[in-house]
C-alpha cells in the first residue's frame, strides 16, 4: 500500500492475492512460526516486549485515523447516526455474535484469562485487572469504529459486509479517501500488529496448557512448541484452500464455544467455593460491603442465566430460522 496505494490496478492484484491459497497458506505459516518464536523467548523477553511496542503504536494510529475520519465532510452526522441505538434490530443472533466477539476480545471462555492469570501477582486486584482489560479493549474497539464506521458511511459503502468489511470494503474506502495511501498503510500495519498479538495469545494458551501435562514435561518446552507448530501446519491446510469453512468455525467456535466456556468459568468461580473465599480472591477483601455483595450475587446468578438464555435462544433461532 505504501508503494502502489489503492489504485484499481493495485486492488485487483490485492484481490488476486486473497484468492491465492498458496500465498495465504504461506503467510499463515509465517505468522504461526513467528508466534511460536515469541512464545519461546518467554513472557518478559517475548510477549511483553512485543506488546510494549505494538499496543502504543496501535493507539497512536487509531487516534490519528479518528481525526482523519472526523475531518471528512458529513462525518458528524455519520457519527451521530452510528452512536444512536436501534434496539429493534437486535435479536438473539446479533446478541450471540456480539457477545462472542466481546468474549474473544477480552479472552474469556478460551482460557486466555486463565493462562495469563498465572503471571499476575498474588496481591493484585483481580477486579481491577478485569476493569482495565475490559476498559482498554472497549476503548480500542471504539477508536477503530469511530474511524471505520463514519468513513464508510460518508462514502456510501456497506457496513454489513462481515469479514469482507476489512478485506473488501476498507480498501475501497481508502482508495476514495484523501491521503488514503498514508492513512491506509498505517491502519493496515496497526491491524497486522495487534492481530499478531491476538494469535500469540492463542498459541500461548495451547503451549502453557500442554506444558503442565505429562507430555509437556516429557518433551520439554522447545520440543513442545515444535510439535504444536507441526500439528498446526497440517491443520491450516484445509482452511487455506477452503476459506469458506472459516466463517462457520468463527460462528461455532468464536461465538458458541467462547460463550459456553465463559458460562462454565463463571459457574466454576462462583459455585465451586464458598462466598467468602470467592469474594476474597476477586475483590481482595474479607469484609465486603453492600456493593461487593451485590456484584458477587450478580456474577453468581444473573450472568450465568443471561449467557445460558442467549445460548438457548441462538439454538432455537438456528433450528426455526
Image (cartoon, rainbow, N blue to C red):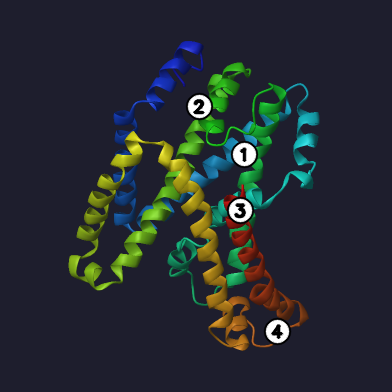
- The label on residue 144 is 1
Check disc 4 and report the residue beneath it: 288
Q: Could one spot residue 53 in this view of the protein? A: no
Residue 29 x %, y %: 30, 40
Crowding around mark 3 (Cα neighbors within 10 Å: few <14, some 14 to 19, many 20+) is many
Callout 3–callout 4 Cβ contact below 8 Å: no
Q: Is residue 221 above or below residue 167?
A: below
Q: Residue at x 65, y 69 (%)?
A: 305
Q: CA distance from mark 3 to mark 4?
A: 33 Å
Q: Earlier in the sequence, mark 3 or mark 4?
A: 3
Q: CA distance from mark 2 to mark 3?
A: 33 Å
Q: CA distance from mark 2 to mark 1?
A: 15 Å
Check disc 3 and report the residue beneath it: 96
Q: Earlier in the sequence, mark 2 or mark 3?
A: 3
Check disc 2 and report the residue beneath it: 185
The residue mark sitting in front, 1 or 3, is: 3
Amino acid at each position: 500500500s505504501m508503494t502502489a496505494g489503492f489504485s484499481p490496478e493495485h486492488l485487483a492484484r490485492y484481490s488476486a492475492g486473497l484468492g491465492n491459497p498458496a500465498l495465504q497458506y504461506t503467510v499463515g505459516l509465517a505468522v504461526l512460526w513467528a508466534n511460536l518464536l515469541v512464545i519461546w523467548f518467554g513472557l518478559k523477553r517475548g510477549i511483553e516486549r512485543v506488546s510494549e511496542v505494538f499496543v502504543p503504536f496501535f493507539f497512536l494510529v487509531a487516534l490519528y485515523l479518528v481525526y482523519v475520519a472526523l475531518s471528512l465532510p458529513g462525518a458528524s452526522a455519520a457519527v451521530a447516526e452510528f452512536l444512536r441505538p436501534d434496539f429493534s434490530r437486535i435479536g438473539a443472533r446479533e446478541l450471540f455474535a456480539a457477545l462472542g466477539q466481546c468474549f474473544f476480545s477480552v479472552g474469556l471462555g478460551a482460557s486466555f484469562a486463565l493462562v495469563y492469570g498465572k503471571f499476575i501477582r498474588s496481591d493484585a486486584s483481580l477486579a481491577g485487572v478485569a476493569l482495565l482489560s475490559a476498559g482498554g479493549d472497549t476503548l480500542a474497539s471504539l477508536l477503530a469504529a469511530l474511524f471505520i464506521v463514519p468513513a464508510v458511511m460518508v462514502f456510501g459503502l456497506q457496513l454489513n459486509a462481515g469479514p469482507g468489511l476489512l478485506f473488501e470494503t476498507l480498501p475501497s474506502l481508502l482508495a476514495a479517501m484523501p491521503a488514503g495511501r498514508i492513512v491506509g498503510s498505517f491502519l493496515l500495519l496497526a491491524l497486522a500488529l495487534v492481530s499478531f498479538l491476538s494469535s500469540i495469545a492463542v498459541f500461548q494458551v495451547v503451549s502453557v496448557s500442554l506444558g503442565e501435562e505429562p507430555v509437556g514435561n516429557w518433551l520439554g518446552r522447545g520440543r513442545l512448541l515444535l510439535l504444536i507448530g507441526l500439528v498446526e501446519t497440517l491443520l491450516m491446510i484445509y482452511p487455506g484452500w477452503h476459506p469458506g469453512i472459516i466463517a462457520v468455525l468463527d460462528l461455532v467456535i468464536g461465538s458458541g464455544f467462547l460463550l459456553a466456556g465463559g458460562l462454565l468459568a463463571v459457574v466454576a468461580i462462583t459455585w465451586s467455593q464458598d462466598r467468602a473465599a470467592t469474594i476474597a480472591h476477586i475483590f481482595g477483601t474479607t469484609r465486603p460491603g453492600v456493593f461487593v455483595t451485590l456484584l458477587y450475587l450478580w456474577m453468581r446468578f444473573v450472568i450465568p442465566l443471561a449467557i445460558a438464555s442467549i445460548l438457548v435462544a441462538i439454538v432455537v433461532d438456528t433450528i426455526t430460522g
